[in-house]
Image (spheres, grey):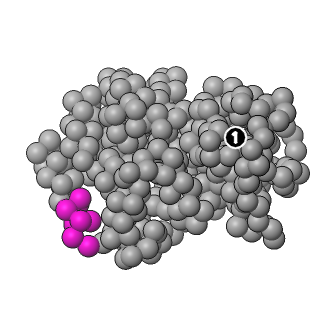
Amino acid sequence: MTVYKNSPTALPACAERQPAFDLPRGRGSASRPDARYLDHRRQAFDDGWPAEGDDAGQPLRTQLFIDSARSVISYNSSPDVPFDRSINPYRGCEHGCIYCFARPSHAWLDLSPGLDFETKLFWKPDAAALLRKELAAPSYRCAPIALGMNTDAWQPVERHTGLTRQLLEVLRETRHPVSLITKSALIERDLDLLAELAREDLVEVTISVTTLDDALARRLEPRAARPGRRLETLRRVHEAGVPVGVLFAPLIPALNDHEMEAVVEAAHAAGARSAGYVLLRLPQELAGLFEEWLATHFPARAARVMSRIAELRGGKANDPRFGHRMRGEGVIAQLYSQRMRRLQARLGMGRMRRELNTALFRPPRPDGPQLALF
């Protein structure tokens, strides 16, 4: 892994050529399309010559850049999500999930939502200090913080930075409620902190499971934990006394939708006590990336998958409207919802999101020699 101190705007604008016949090893995207805000567009062209350079034919290396920020808590007023604030320790995600709805956000950095999103990552080294400062503000009012909602807070780079654990330590110190979602087994490293938070009803964990098919998972989410390992992580979180649920996400029509019952039942057997799902979202550049992925890995099924998505999205690849973007619309969308409700009733599982304890919050102690009175 290469670590850079450059600002995001200092990154080179040129893109590496990724011909369709030379797929990057261990990556979800097959290409690096230009960001939508650039004033130019490039198109890959195969001239018959092999790619040149020291890295030709080699796995693409992950690069880590410092992201200078003045705050770490992001606020939202979306009616589709059950939280109004969140923390994302990283921009970009090494898991490489081709379906990730956060991919288009890399365009804000003039980087590609394709391969750049999973190879050019950004982190905030001072995130824990910034969090302490924000929680100490006299105007701050406690409400559950959602950790890692856009990109996974326990993605592989976390093994090197420890950034997510630092944030959890601040939340434990201040007894601040937090909800987490991940598809990484690395969360087991932090079970000591999570168990301590759980004893005071300050945490809930959601494990995302997309499929039980290892071959499909390897293509969909190449650097995430394999499905069986995620279920084992779910079991360990449950045994540690931490409330845990499963999110079947994304639900991809004509690709993994038939697995809803199998995934939820396996998660319930491992200790999940709540369940939910989210329909595949394809905002901005993600639509083209996903269609490219389908053509590469499932060419015979590609047209059917996109046709079914359009049926759920009012004839389009994506529908960003609140109230529709997570579930879709129409008869098929209603059937998905009914299937999940019946599963929850049959297995005795609740819906996603519990009420967490906000009464125990205490602002962090200020840095300095002054001792606390109590």
In the picture shown, does residue 295 fall above or below 160?
Answer: below
Q: Residue furthest left?
A: 346
State which quadrant residue 286 falls in: bottom right
The rendered magenta stretch, by its main secondary structure, is classed as helix
- What is the span of residues highlighted in magenta in the rendered image? 330-337
Q: Give the quarter of the figure containing the N terminus.
A: top right
Badge 1 element: helix
> In the image, is 359 to the left or to the right of 352?
right
Q: Give the quarter of the figure containing the C terminus.
A: top right
Is-magenta flag for residue 347? no
Residue type at tag 1: Thr
Give residue 274's position: percent from left, percent from top: 27, 44
**Residue at position x 70%, y 67% from top?**
36
Q: Nearer the viewer, residue 122 or 257?
A: 257
> In the image, is 237 to the left or to the right of 142?
left
> What residue is pinned by disc 1?
119
Q: Nearer the viewer, residue 44 or 156?
A: 44
In the picture shown, does residue 285 fall above or below 145?
Answer: below
State which quadrant residue 120 falls in: top right
Q: Nearer the viewer, residue 125 or 221?
A: 221
Give residue 5's position: percent from left, percent from top: 87, 40
